[in-house]
Image (tube, rainbow, N blue to C red):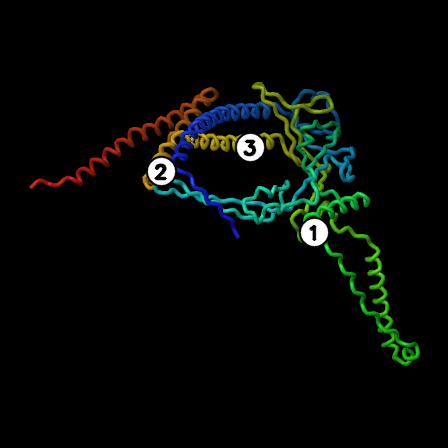
Amino acid sequence: MAYQEVTTTGYGTRVGNSFKAIGSGILLFCLGTALLWWNEGRAVKTEKMLDEAGSAYVEMENPNKKDASLEGELICGTALATTEDSLIDKDFGVGAKAIALKRNVEYYQWVEHSQEKKEDKLGGKEVTTTTYTYTKEWTSRPVESAQFKDPAYQNKNMVLTTVEDAEQYAENVSWGAYKLNESLIHSIHSNEGLDLAIAEDLLKQMDKSAQAAYERFYGVQKNNQPAQQPAQPTAIPDSIKAMLPDSVKAQLDSLQAVNDSINKAMAAAENKKDLEYVHQAGNILYYGRVPGSPEVGDVRVTFEKVVPAKVTVMAVVDGDSFKPFKAKNGKRFQTLVMGKKSGDEIIEAEKEANSALLWILRIVGILMVIGGLKGIFGFLETILKVVPFIAGIFGWGVGIVCTVIGVVWSLIVIAIAWLFYRPLLGISLLVIAGFLIWVFAFKGKDKLKELAAKAKAKNEVPAV
């Protein structure tokens, strides 16, 4: 059942908040403008750096042999990245010879979701209805349920244990006859599950702690009743057995063998001290009673290792290692990609990524500028909230005006930024922005005059 909370904000408070929002709107407008300016410069510098790198790199034909003639050169080559370093997770005592070890932790928790519905009332009041719903989910960190809105779900969360995410990398990773630097090592992502072999004493200690946490929250669990022993078949006397046909004797002997096998398996199960609250399977350590049926408080820890893999490196040779390429404009570049790639493929992929980031940040910047303008002029709509219908129409108009001005302003900022790098494109953007201003300021005004004239002619009464 969803829980709802209804709040009412008075007209005076709303107007006061709208005036306070002017400062936030100005700040957002300025930040959006700065982002647009910086983004254009970043994109151009990155593209020029990639062009310079694309014309400067040389293919390293045999990375397994050092070549003194390549010292200081930007190279592109493919080889196996491997290591002899052994990494150990100190908290759990598991490890492997690997490029990296990674530990990811999830908690099964109640999670609160909220949805707001706002309604303007005559006189300027605003009624906000917030609906809260709750679901059980795996989360990356424990959820504090004491702050939940619905009292029925408050303090419903707990965890059997807390474990931090962790990752560690090998210090010595070979790439052919060379060594990879730290940044390149961190770019390798040939992840595989790490099979667990946690010491029994440690598992028992973790199980005991998890059991104590479980019983503090859920209460002491009743001991399971011992399994009922299967009925033992009645032994047939030898005198009677001797009178039976050989086929029946064979079937009886077979049944007795099966029964003996079942008894041995049950005896082994009774002697086995299985852990009730901690389970390990493959690369997952699970805190909880039943891994396939999670309860609130269960914890799932996943272990991974980064194994040797074939990778392509594009960087400047620096002795027996590498360093970033430094372009004339000061931008630096080095990269590692999985598998075999040519230098041209890497440069092209980097250019596509740069273009995608350029447009993403452009959209974000434009939205920030428009949002800032709406924050600045939003008080005009709020003042008219005494009559919601009129305020809605006026707010729609303010939104359109802010959107148009925001887009025009953004185009001007982008154009001026590009004038420093590519004048032709900058001038084109300024022309587009000017055209939009002309259409909005003059054509819009003429259209309004035309509509007013038609309305006046319609309302005039012919003279008799």
Tell me the residue that label 1 is attached to. 219
Give the position of the C terminus as an image quadrant.
top left
**The residue under label 3 is which amino acid type?**
Ala
What residue is rendered at 67% in x and 28% in y? 183
Q: In terms of sequence position, does the residue under pointer 1 or pointer 2 come before the other?
A: 1
Q: Which mark is residue 385?
A: 2
Calculate the distance from the C-alpha at mark 1 to the C-alpha at mark 3. Answer: 54 Å
- The answer to whether any part of residue 74 appears in the image is yes
Taking 211 as reference, is 369 left or right? left
Closer to viewer: mark 1 or mark 2: 1
- The answer to whether any part of residue 281 appears in the image is no
Secondary structure of the residue carrying tag 1 is: loop
Looking at the image, which is closer to me, 142 or 61?
142
Q: In terms of sequence position, does the residue under pointer 3 or pointer 2 come before the other?
A: 3
Q: Residue furthest right?
A: 239
How crowded pointer 2 is (Cα within 10 Å; few <14, some 14-19, many 20+) is rated as many
Q: In terms of sequence position, does the residue under pointer 1 or pointer 3 come before the other?
A: 1
Tell me the residue that label 3 is attached to. 353
Closer to viewer: mark 1 or mark 3: 1
Q: Position of residue 196 (x, y in %)?
A: 76, 44
Using the rendered view, name the quadrant where residue 375 is placed. top left
**The residue under label 2 is which amino acid type?**
Lys
Q: Is residue 74 above or below residue 295?
A: above
Taking 133 as reference, is 402 left or right? left
* Pointer 1 with pointer 3, Cβ within 8 A: no
Calculate the distance from the C-alpha at mark 3 to the C-alpha at mark 2. Answer: 46 Å
How crowded pointer 1 is (Cα within 10 Å; few <14, some 14-19, many 20+) is rated as few
What residue is rendered at 47% in x and 19% in y? 420
Q: Position of residue 216 (x, y in %)?
A: 70, 47
Q: Position of residue 198 (x, y in %)?
A: 79, 43
Secondary structure of the residue carrying tag 2 is: helix
